[in-house]
Amino acid sequence: MEAMRILTVGDCAVSVEFGQEISLEINHKVMALKMVLEREPIRGIVELIPTYCSLLIQYDPMDLRYGQLREKLYTLVNQLDEVEMPPKQVVEIPVAYGGEYGPDLGEVARAHNISEEEVIKLHSEPEYPIYMLGFVAGFPYLGGMNKAIASPRKKSPRLKIEAGSVGIAGEQTGIYSVESPGGWQIIGRTPLKLYDVNRNEPVLLKAGQYIKFKPITKEEFRAMENEHKGN
């Protein structure tokens, strides 16, 4: 793994970078530093934003000087190997695959010369680490998808993709947290709301968690959707 670097981002943020590749080893370092800073807060730090390979730290320069922060971070980074991480937290995401909820499932299956059922099996087997959230509020960037169902983005992106849509783009899979345009191959949809401004915690998922997709029927989807509408 590459040596850690601290990069300035404007005059009130730094990025603590642990490498340049997407890997669980690097991301665990990112999440370990975030956890330490949450457990033992440093006065002046305003927000912590994890990414694939780095932790963005926003701070108030009136409370915390850059040199002080840099010194504290180097001390903490040297202790990360001793940090005991919490047990893996897996969030189950129910998904209705195919049909009106996954219009591209057949296309993905045909591209790999396998059945739609095999695509569903391969897609729902792994526990996917959430490396980061971004793009739009609550959108999870996941790792760990089986390369056997890797599929290119659509040549002509859709102008509207429903919130909750589960898609594949290259070797990645993800969930559209809000309605938006997009070019991912849509293979299913979850009735869960990944982002809801009316909840106490609007964003359902967190970086560092894992996702396990659970295939459900279209009848189960509609029942769960109606249940969530009533909340």
Image (spheres, grey):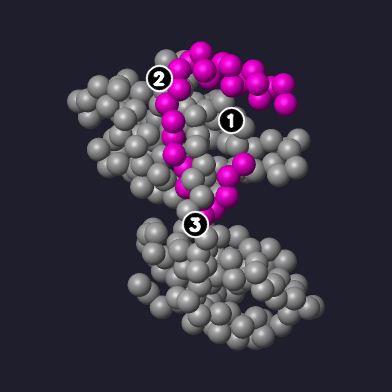
Q: Which residues are magenta?
A: 204-231
Q: Position of residue 118 (x, y in %)?
A: 27, 27
Which residue is the site of mark 3? 87
Is any part of residue 172 visible from this angle? no
The residue nearer to you, when weighing 123 against 152, is 123
Q: Nearer the viewer, mark 3 or mark 2?
A: 3
Residue at image mark 2? 98
Kindly tell me whether residue 82 is visible in this rendering: yes
Q: Residue at x 20, y 25 (%)?
A: 113
Outermost residue toward the left in this view: 113
Look at discs 3 and 1 and give the one toward the viewer: 3
Location of mark 1 (residue) = 192
Amino acid beneath label 1: Leu
| Mark before the other along the chain sequence, 3 or 2 | 3
Disc 2 crowd rating (10 Å Cα; few below 14, some 14-19, many 20+) is many
Discs 3, 1 touching: Cβ within 8 Å: no
Secondary structure of the residue carrying tag 3 is loop
Cα–Cα gap, marks 2 and 1: 17 Å
Query: Where is residue 44, by image quadrant?
Result: bottom right
| Amino acid type, mark 2 | Gly
Q: Is residue 45 left or right of residue 109?
A: right
Mark in the foreground, 2 or 1:
1
Q: Is residue 145 above or below residue 155?
A: below
Say above or below: 127 vs 178: below
